[in-house]
Image (cartoon, rainbow, N blue to C red):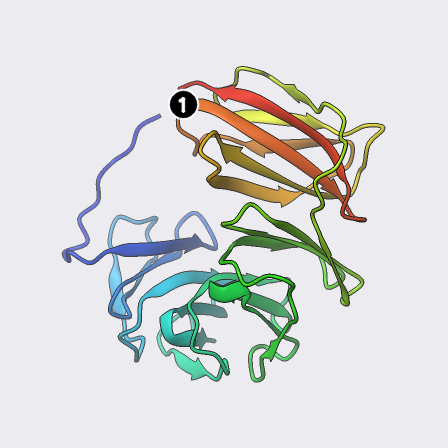
Amino acid sequence: ESWEWVSIGINNRLLSVYFVSETTGWVTGVNGLILKTTDGGITWQAQESGTMEELWAIKFVSAETGWASGTGGVILKTTDGGDTWVKQESGVITELSNIQFISSEEGWLSGENGTVLRTKDGGQTWQKETVPTTEWISSMHFTDARHGCITTTFGEIYLYKDTTTLIKDILSEFDALKIWPNPTTEYIFLDTSGKTDQGCYAIWDQAGRLYLSGMINGEQTRVNTQSLASGLYMVKVIDQKGKIRGTGRFVKMN
């Protein structure tokens, strides 16, 4: 395994990256920067975004259709692989730093001040969701239109259920969570057998910084830890009713 530096010919701060295949992907950055590669990142071509806002997130549902979002509530959509980007009306001025779509029509944006926006028509209209927090939403993940999970920089977890119910994480009694291999270098398994087979997990470091989150997948969930630096990390698992079903910790080694 090795990492190879690639020159892109500019000196902008880069904020997000997304690939739809081994060869085709995009990065975003400050001053409305969008770059695209079709050769696996060897070369990058600038695309005209039509904005000077910082673009904190970019996601595609196909090689043609995708969205970018960022400061000032900016939302951009493309249906031609980024050759043209069209602004969509968000109705907010807060920073939008997370994007997820489960289809070409239905998706969510989230970010600053507990902002969550939802669309069911590909972004033609966006509705602001009611979320019981004003903290910055650091990450979110939806498995379908009825089930999702968001985390905040304040250490909160909220579960989304049946499209109407958001359940706050209430600290209560919990069971020890089985985690292996521990120590680990590349991945861990979370054993939630006898606890829950649906819900979400979150991983923090000792300073309380959230690094990873996602949905529980059956009784054993595999989590990729290659992006984590060496150190001690805490794990919490929440079921769909908002109850903590397990906590644990593991050591990451490089």
Q: Which residue is mark 1?
A: 230
Q: Position of residue 17 (x, y in %)?
A: 38, 54
Q: Position of residue 125 (x, y in %)?
A: 58, 84
Q: Nearer the viewer, residue 184 or 160?
A: 160
> Which residue is drawn at the image coordinates 72% and 23% (left, top)?
176
Q: Image quadrant of residue 234?
A: top right
> Which residue is drawn at the image coordinates 50% and 83% (left, top)?
91
Q: Pick the quarter of the image with the N terminus.
A: top left
Kindly state the secondary structure of the residue where label 1 is placed: loop
Q: Image quadrant of residue 250?
A: top right
> Which residue is drawn at the image coordinates 38% and 78% (left, top)?
85
Q: Image quadrant of residue 108?
A: bottom right
Instruction: Tell me which amino acid carries mark 1.
Output: Ser
Is residue 236 visible in this depiction of the protein?
Answer: yes
Q: Nearer the viewer, residue 131 or 3?
A: 131
Q: Report whether 37 appears left or right of 62.
A: left
